[in-house]
Amino acid sequence: MLRSTSGPRRVVLVLSALLLSIFLVLPKQSRSLLQHLGQPFAQIVAFPLGALSALDRSVREVWSGYIALRHVREENRRLRQEIELLRGQNGELREIATATQRLGALLEFKEGAASETIAAQVVGRDTTSWYRALVLNKGGRDGIRPEMGVMTQVGVVGRVVKVNSSTSVVLLVTDPNNAVTGLIQRTRDEGIVEGTAQGLARMKYIPLLSAVRIGDTVVTSGLTGGFPKGLVIGSVRSIDKGEGDLFQSAEITPEVDVSKLEEVLVISAPRPLEEPAAAAGSLVPKQPQRRER
Amino acid sequence: MKQALYAGLLLGLVPIQTTVLDHVSISGIRPDLCLIAACLVGFFAGERDGMVLGFALGFVQDLFSAGELWLNLVTKGLIGFLAGLVGRLLANATPAAMLATLLGLSVVSGTIFLMAVRVGESLADLFYVVRAVLLPQALFDAAVGTGAYWLIARHGRTQDATQEGPTPFW
């Protein structure tokens, strides 16, 4: 039996047609309108999101604690042996550390100001399976803005694409919708690093004469906003050089395992690129300005 | 009661989708709870409820997704509406019919995403995404949605046996 809902149905249909036409005709305005409308909703949903994330984390910790206990006796015996070995190595390392400190101070002299970062916790993944993205527990009120770069101590993670007041969404470097300018560390050839459908990354527009090799490290070039120069993106896994192509491309294995991220650093102010002459002319070694909030 | 249920779905589904569901993902694919909810509400409560709840769920989902702010809003609204239409046509839906309906609607949703999202450069990338995301997602949605439908229908039958008159699914 059909329900007689022609009146409300007509209203709903007209409304949805109106909505759709607004989206199609005024995409930019509708996006900003939705963004404004969404702020209070995002703030409300952030509460259960935070609570669930905390619950999820504690359950994971309890579980991993249980697993750890099962192997603790065997591990304890092995660790005691390792301690003896490490005590011996420790003395040697202290000597090396002293030398490294001296060399580090010299290196610091050459280095410009380090980037300012905001530490954030990963509270979730993208709400769809179509994007490779993370949800962070910090947002606009913590100083996070769209297009900021996100990294860990290992390397590049992605960039911020959406900011709510207390959360933000980071598009990972492995997503095909993401692009970062990269540099092959050894050959100094530049290109654009994009994500691939398979969850890796691909560096495009590498000059045809470049001597790029498998295993080469790819770092950020610092040409686009969000990332300072020299952050590790990944290493070359394979190279494609088609006949008649103007450029080569290389498949890259990202340095950061994005499936296991729990904490990240959002780069609020990338280190400005310094002129080599200015850096060399300075007599006072600069202190690193890395700041975590 | 209905409003409370809808509010609960609005507040609870997206946080569950972003946090807990990661543990049940298979090769990075998780069931789309918002799509399933829009479908079931459309199916049981009509196309208007399905579409309005779909719009709302899609809107909240878009706030925590890397995609454009309209993509889930439009898709989930459309799916809720279509589910309502299918629900009107099927007087006595069996779980098998529900499985087919959910599978079809999830494929429709996936096709919209496929057109809106950049999946790669080559045709091979497109086929890879259809094989690795669209179809597994549709199967996952259909399986979870049919399970939820079966539970709701069973709950309805139990209530029917103890009470007089038709029982709403909530």
Image (spheres, coloured by chain):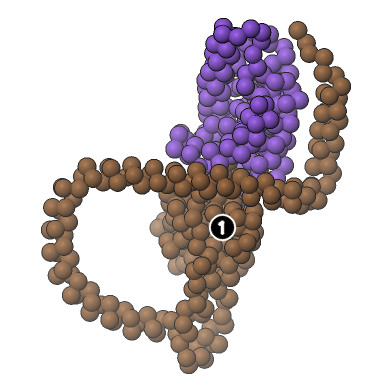
Chain colours: A brown, B purple
Q: Chain of mark 1?
A: A
Left or right, A154 with respect to A49, comes to: left
- State the image coordinates of residue A75 (x, y, percent, origin top left): 18, 50
**Above/below status of A214 relative to A106:** above
Q: On the image, numbered disc 1 is attached to which residue?
A: A138
Describe the element under mark 1 as helix, strand or loop. Answer: loop
Q: Quadrant of the N terminus of chain B?
A: top right
- State the image coordinates of residue A218 (x, y, percent, origin top left): 48, 61
| Residue A156 visible in this rendered orientation of the protein | no
Residue lying at 49% horizontally and 65% vertically, measured from the top left: A231
| Residue A62 visible in this rendered orientation of the protein | yes
Residue A195 versus residue A97: which sits nearer the camera?
A: A97
Residue B78 versus residue A275: which sits nearer the camera?
A: B78
Left or right, A61 with respect to A191, comes to: left
Left or right, A194 with respect to A79, comes to: right
- State the image coordinates of residue A243 (x, y, percent, origin top left): 56, 49
**Above/below status of A14 relative to A261:** above
Q: Amino acid at mark 1?
A: Lys
